[in-house]
Image (cartoon, rainbow, N blue to C red):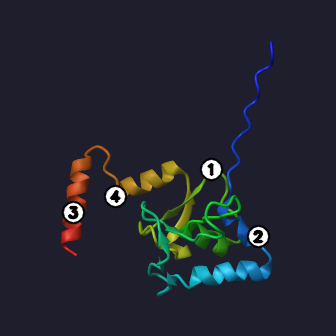
Amino acid sequence: MPEPLEKKPKETKVHEAFIFTYQPAEKQKHLDRYWSRIDKRGPDDCWEFYGCILSNGYGLLPIGKSGRPQRLEPRAHRLAWVIKYNMLIPKGLCVCHRCDNKICCNPSHLFLGTIKTNLVDMHMKKKLNRLNPKKHTEKKQKEEKSI
């Protein structure tokens, strides 16, 4: 009877790794493109990303040709954290927003946390209402109308 094949763990691509692996000129080209898409304001303000915005509301900086295995798609806020701290995001952690603005790339608004930390943070700020999604939707619609 043949032995069962071991499943190889799926390799995950670290999209922000180009900061450490690309040649300086190539890296600088992408960083210039990144910063040109950010509206940097005061040190306490949100620095909003105005490039590609995903349907989930997060910014994305595509690097490379679509459909190619070498294509990288770092999220804008994650890239901001990597640039600021000059290190990759530790495995198992995510980059969370203190300001709850998904396109904000101001490193002073970002912090590392687990998914649980992020959910607790959102709950504490009353941004997440899983117990009553209808109430959450109504509140959001009311906020949008007042703008």
Residue holding disc 3: 141
Instruction: Classify 10 Å Cα crowding around label 3: few (below 14), some (14-19), many (20 and above).
Output: few
Which dot, 1 or 3, sits closer to the camera? Answer: 3
Mark 2: amino acid: Phe
**Disc 1 marks which amino acid?**
Gly
Residue 92 - label: 1
4 or 3: mark nearer the eye: 3
Separation of marks 2 and 4 at Cα, in angstroms:
35 Å
Amino acid bearing label 3? Gln
Dot 2: element: helix
Of pointers 2 and 3, the one earlier in the residue sequence:
2
Which residue does the numbered mark 4 point to in the structure image? 127
Residue 77 percent across, percent down from the top left: 54, 69
Q: Give me the residue at 42% from left, 69% from top.
A: 101
Q: Between label 2 and label 4, give the one nearer the viewer.
A: 2
Q: CA distance from mark 2 to mark 3?
A: 43 Å
Residue ID for mark 2: 20
Q: Nearer the viewer, residue 107 or 70?
A: 70
Q: Quadrant of residue 65?
A: bottom right
Amino acid marked by disc 4: Lys
Please tell me which of labels 1 and 3 falls first in the chain. Answer: 1
Task: Tell me how far mark 1 sits from mark 2, CA to CA.
Answer: 20 Å
Quarter the N terminus occupies: top right
Q: Secondary structure at mark 1?
A: loop
Residue at 44%, 81% (x, y): give it. 45
In the displayed structure, 141 sits above or below 45; it is: above
Circle nearer the N terminus (1, 2): 2
Q: Is residue 58 above or below residue 1?
A: below
Residues at badges 2 and 3 in contact (C-beta under 8 Å)? Answer: no
Q: Residue at x 32, y 57 (%)?
A: 126
